[in-house]
């Protein structure tokens, strides 16, 4: 049995890691997006990397971005009617595959919620 030296093992490990990451980042095509036939995991991956599907540009924030403070009174649960059905906010988010929701009231964050593996720093279309 041959033992790999560290100098050889590191590039091999990085190559395998790169292959694993590349598999997780499979993307749908422009036609797939417009047809609406992507399985949810592939759709989420595609929207996270939309700059690889459509021509894109980076928009840099201004010199003094204004913070959005959190409201002392947060929205916790909402019930409403949609298409003749009573729904809770969580149901609506799940049924409509909402990936993030930000509610501002009087310039303050009243609700900030992320779904489908997204987080505040996730890139999204």
Image: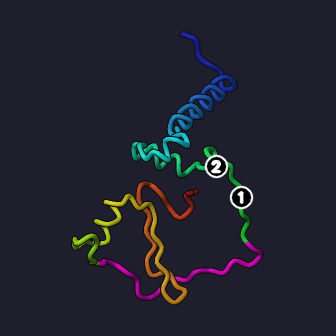
Residue 118 vertical position relative to residue 11 in the rendered view, above or below: below
Q: Residue at x 48, y 86 (%)?
A: 105
**Farthest residue in the top direction?**
1
In which image quadrant can residue 2 be found?
top right
- Circle 1 sits on which residue? 58
- Residue 63 painted magenta: yes
Q: Which residues are magenta?
A: 62-78
Element class at badge 2 = helix
| Residue 47, position as x, y percentages in the image | 53, 51
Q: Residue at x 69, y 25 (%)?
A: 7
Q: Are marks 2 and 1 in contact (CB under 8 Å)?
A: no
Report the predominant secondary structure element of the magenta stretch.
loop
- Circle 2 sits on which residue? 51
Q: Is residue 63 left or right of residue 119?
A: right
User: Toward the viewer: 106 or 68?
Assistant: 106
User: Toward the viewer: 89 or 81?
Assistant: 81
Element class at badge 1 = loop
**Farthest residue in the right direction?**
63
Mark sitting earlier along the chain (2/1) = 2
Residue 112 vertical position relative to residue 4 in the rendered view, above or below: below
- Residue 77 painted magenta: yes
Q: Residue at x 58, y 80 (%)?
A: 68
Number of numbered discs on residues: 2
User: Toward the viewer: 34 or 116?
Assistant: 34
In which image quadrant can residue 6 be found?
top right
Q: Is residue 30 left or right of residue 91?
A: right
Neighbor class of circle 2 (other Cα within 10 Å; few <14, some 14-19, many 20+) is: some
Distance in Å between CA atoms under marks 2 and 1: 9 Å
| Residue 108, position as x, y percentages in the image | 52, 85
């Amino acid at each position: 049995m041959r033992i790999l030296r560290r100098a050889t093992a590191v590039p091999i490990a990085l190559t395998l890691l790169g292959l694993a990451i590349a598999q997780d980042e499979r993307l749908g095509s422009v036609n797939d997006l417009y047809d609406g036939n992507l399985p949810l995991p592939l759709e989420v991956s595609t929207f996270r990397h939309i700059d690889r599907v459509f021509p894109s540009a980076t928009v840099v924030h201004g010199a003094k971005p204004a913070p959005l403070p959190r409201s002392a009174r947060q929205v916790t649960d909402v019930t409403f009617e949609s298409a003749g059905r009573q729904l809770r906010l969580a149901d609506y988010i799940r049924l409509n595959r909402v990936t993030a929701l930000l509610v501002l009231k009087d310039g303050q964050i009243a609700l900030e919620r992320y779904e489908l593996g997204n987080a505040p720093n996730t890139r999204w279309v």
